[in-house]
Amino acid sequence: MKTVILSLFTGVFAGFLFSMLKLPIPAPATFAGVMGIVGLFLGFLMGKIIRAKIF
């Protein structure tokens, strides 16, 4: 849980920094883009689970 909280704070700080420097955010700015990242992560987890059961 500590890692999740640190990741969240790091993301918030990075987002704030990008905003203050008027740089484009290095993440999707739409809900569809965020869901694409979630799908990518879920696919990765499924692959790990399937690989662990096969090998």
Image (cartoon, rainbow, N blue to C red):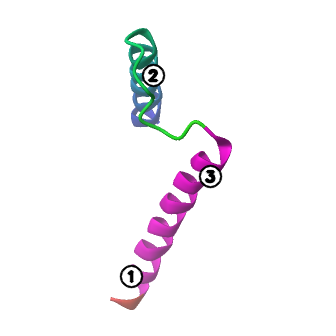
Q: Earlier in the sequence, mark 1 or mark 3?
A: 3
Badge 1 local density, few (<14 within 10 Å), some, or many (20+)? few
Q: Give the labeled residue for mark 3.
A: 35
Q: Quadrant of residue 17?
A: top left
Magenta stretch containing residue 46, yes or no?
A: yes
Magenta part, dominant SS: helix
Q: Where is mark 1, residue-wise?
A: 51
- The stretch of residues the image draws in magenta is 30-53
SS of the residue under disc 2: helix
Q: Check disc 2: other Cα within 10 Å, few if <14, some if 14-19, many if 20+.
A: some
Amino acid type, mark 3: Met
Q: Secondary structure at mark 3?
A: helix
User: Real-space Cα distance between discs 2 and 3?
Assistant: 18 Å
Confirm or deny contact between disc 1 and disc 2 (CB under 8 A): no
Mark 2: amino acid: Gly
Q: CA distance from mark 1 to mark 2?
A: 35 Å
> What residue did someone put label 2 on?
15
Residue occupying image coordinates x 41% and y 32%: 7
Magenta stretch encompasses residue 14: no
